[in-house]
Image (cartoon, helix red, strand yellow):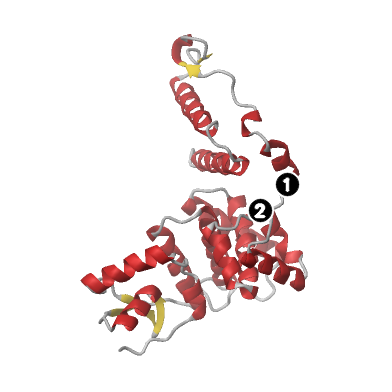
Amino acid sequence: MKDIMIDEEFRDLLPALDIDTYARLEQNIIQYGCLFPLVLWNGILVDGYHRLRICTTHDIPFETIEQDFASRDEAVIWIISNQISRRNLAPMQLSYYRGLHYRADRKIVTNPYGRQKHSADESQNATHQKDQSTATRLAKQYKVSRDTILRESKIAAAIDAIGESSPEAKRRILSGEMSINKNVLEGLSSWPKEDIVELAAKIEEGSYERKRTGSEQEGAADVQGLQWPSAPITPGGEGDGVEVSGMSPFEAAIARITEELFAELRKQSSTEDVKSALRSYINMLEDLYSQII
C-alpha cells in the first residue's frame, strides 16, 4: 500500500456521502476496481478520500498521480472547483464552496509568497479594491452577483465555525437536513464563542428551530399571497392576457420567459423556495446585463 498522507482540511472539503451513495460507490469499486487514480500533492491526498477508504478496506489496488500546486490555497481551490464540476450540490453546499473559493483566493492575493505580491504598507483602500476585484472575477465564473460572492464568504466562515464545535452540525447544514437562515450565518462572526457552541449543539441534536425574518413571516402563511401578475402574457393581444404586440421581439421574448417563471413559482408552497428561485433568476439577468458592451 502506498505511503499517503491524510490532510483533515482537504478531507473535510468533500461532501459527506449518505449511506446509499457510499454503498453504490463501494460496490462499483469492488466490481470494477478503482478506475480513477487518487490525486496527491507532495504525498498529501488531495482527491480520492472515499476511494482510498474503500480500497484500503477491501485490499483493492489503486493508482496515484501527483498534481503540482503553487501553495496550499491553490490546492484548496482545485478541490473546490473539482467538487462543483462533479456533483449535483445542494444550494447551501454550493454557497459554501463559492465562499471558500473566495476566501482561498483572497489569501493568495494578499499572501506575499503567493501569486501576487504587494508591499507591507499597502493601503486599506487598495486591499478593499482587491477584495472587490476577486469577488467580481468569481461572480463571472459562477454566474452570480458580486454581492452574492461576498455574502457567501461570510456564510462559509460561519459554517466552518459551527463545524469546529460540531462536524455533524456542519454536515446537516450543508446537506440541507437542517434549514438555517443565511442572515443568521452572516451575523455569526459577532456571536460569542459559547453561543456558537450552543447553536451547533442544537443543530446536531435536531432541536434548532429556524426563525423567520419579518418579511418571511408575512408571506409564510400563503405564498399565493405574493403579488403575481393577474393575467397571462399572450402575443398579439389574444385572449385576456397582457398584450405584447406593441413590444419589440426581444421584449416580447423576455415577457414570455418571465410569465413561464411566474407560472412555475405559483406552484411553490415555500416562501424560501420562491425567494431562492427569484434570486437565481435575478443573478442570471445581472450576469447577462454585465456582458452587454
Residue 196 is situated, as x and y percent measured from the top left of the image, at 71, 68
Residue closest to the eye, 255 or 133:
255
Q: What residue is drawn where x is 50% and y is 73%?
A: 12
- Secondary structure under tag 2 reads loop
Which residue is under mark 2? 181
Q: Is residue 212 above or below residue 224?
A: below
Residue 168 is situated, as x and y percent measured from the top left of the image, at 57, 70
Residue furthest to the left: 32
* Residue 118 in view of the camera: no
Residue 134 is situated, as x and y percent measured from the top left of the image, at 56, 59
Amino acid beneath label 1: Thr
Neighbor class of circle 2 (other Cα within 10 Å; few <14, some 14-19, many 20+) is: few
Residue 16: image tag: none
Q: CA distance from mark 1 to mark 2?
A: 9 Å
Which residue is under mark 1? 213
Q: Earlier in the sequence, mark 1 or mark 2?
A: 2
Residue closest to the eye, 230 or 25:
25
Q: What residue is drawn where x is 61% and y is 54%?
A: 179
Amino acid beneath label 2: Asn
Residue closest to the eye, 248 or 60:
60
Residue 199 is situated, as x and y percent measured from the top left of the image, at 70, 65
Q: Is residue 248 above or below residue 66?
A: above
Whether tag 1 and tag 2 are in contact, CB under 8 A, the answer is yes
- Secondary structure under tag 1 reads loop
